[in-house]
Image: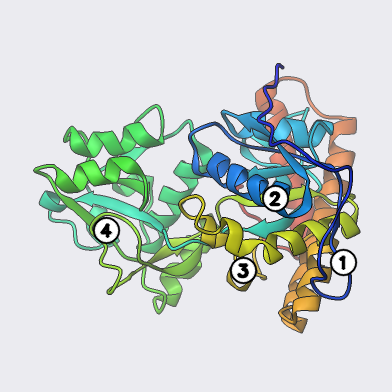
Amino acid sequence: MNFKWTGIAATACFALAAPAGAQDIELPRVIAWSAYDTGSAGHAHSIAIGNMMRSRYGTTVRVLPGRNDVSRMTPLRDGTVDYCLCGVAAYFAWEGVFLFAAPEWGPQPIRAVLQAVGDYGLGVAAAADAGIETIADLKGKRVGRAASSPAVDVNMEGLLAFADLGWEDVNAVEFSGYVNSLQGILEDRVDAAFALTTTTVNYQIEASPRGLKWLETPADDTEGWARFQAVAPFVTPHMVSVGPGIDPAAPLEMAQYPYPILVTEDDQDPAEVRNILAALDAGFDDYKDAAPGANAYAIDRQILNWVMPWSDGSVAYFKEKGIWTPEAQAHQDMLVGRQQVLATAWSGFVKDAPDGEEAFVAGWMKARAEALEAAGLEVYFR
């Protein structure tokens, strides 16, 4: 695989800065991470952060762009980079599911460093002319399905589950990808599809003769949210104030998950992780307005009880900041235990794994479910 680096020049071998917490921030000369491709929000965030790291600490952030989930995760797995500014696929890799339920992957020893928790949201984008007011109204309607994109497909399946619906209850129309499914609304091929509120095509839908209607998932519908999170455990309720058709003064009750997420592996030096996080916090004002959505990395926005365990270095810094709680520690301990269960299950399974892609995936998913159930843990993505 050929990699093309985006470099931000370094000016020092090692950088020392003013104290942030109990000790000075000491950073390596170069920090390498993979990220979304040029033109994406994740890449723009990387450049903004890199400029701050260079100006404050003389440290280079080397960005390795990747076009898809596998190309972003592969350098982390192989040690080409120590960090990945990734999406929810990092969580799928952590669980060893979808594209990562393969012999060369399996559950990855990933830990979160810092989340971007922005003002955007996710949910169902519906054509305003389709007479759809709630997710329950999708029954019998034409709904876009990006079957080749697990993250999109799982989100839409979870949103249908919110209203106690499944794919069998709607007229599913398959598309080759996420944006194409939204284009299907413009082309009157579907009535609704999953969307992030800030996706560009949503503005086109709003301005089209069809118009745009967002379907809400109110946080007080606890049964609906239980069904939603049983399918997509990585989502959380969120008041959404950014996107076409959304009045910032009257946010909508929708959903969200952190994006992007800076992740590393569980054996990455905790002191280095702590110092990187301290630098990102100390220099926040320098980069928060330098790229759209970069303000989402604020320390006080972090979802401590998310679905992925934190790096020990992040935990150390959260403790310094006084935001780490006993509840967060209990959740962290549970997730670290889950990580160990998945790793042990994988190690046992691959010794006598069946031949053939389909047999391998089916066998792993069965072994994974059995191991999690035996440990008294939730089984997602059966």
Q: How far apart are labels 3 and 4 at the CA level?
A: 24 Å
116 sits left or right of 101 in the view: left
Identify the residue at the far top of this view: 2
- Coordinates of residue 277 in the picture (x, y in percent): 75, 60
User: Badge 1 is on which residue?
Assistant: 24
Instruction: Give SS at disc 4.
Output: strand
Picture residue at 28% right of the left edge, 51% below the top = 125
Mark whose residue sits in front, 3 or 4: 3
- Coordinates of residue 220 in the picture (x, y in percent): 40, 79
- What amino acid type is highlighted by mark number 3? Ile
Picture residue at 20% right of the left edge, 33% below the top = 189
Q: How far apart are labels 1 and 4 at the CA level?
A: 47 Å
User: Badge 3 is on which residue?
Assistant: 303
User: Badge 2 is on which residue?
Assistant: 55
Instruction: Give SS at disc 1.
Output: loop
- What amino acid type is highlighted by mark number 2? Ser
User: Badge 4 is on which residue?
Assistant: 214
Of the residues under marks 4 and 2, which one precedes in the sequence? 2
Picture residue at 32% right of the left edge, 71% below the top = 251
Q: How far apart are labels 1 and 2 at the CA level?
A: 17 Å
- Of residues 23 and 345, the one nearer the viewer is 23
Q: How far apart are labels 3 and 1 at the CA level?
A: 26 Å
Q: How far apart are labels 4 and 2 at the CA level?
A: 41 Å
Asked whether residue 5 is in view, the answer is: yes
User: Is label 1 in contact with label 2 (beta carbons under 8 Å)?
Assistant: no
Image quadrant occupied by the N terminus: top right
- Of residues 274 and 289, the one nearer the viewer is 289
- What amino acid type is highlighted by mark number 1? Asp
- Of residues 24 and 377, the one nearer the viewer is 24
Mark whose residue sits in front, 3 or 1: 1
| Residue 166 versus residue 256 in the image, above or below | above
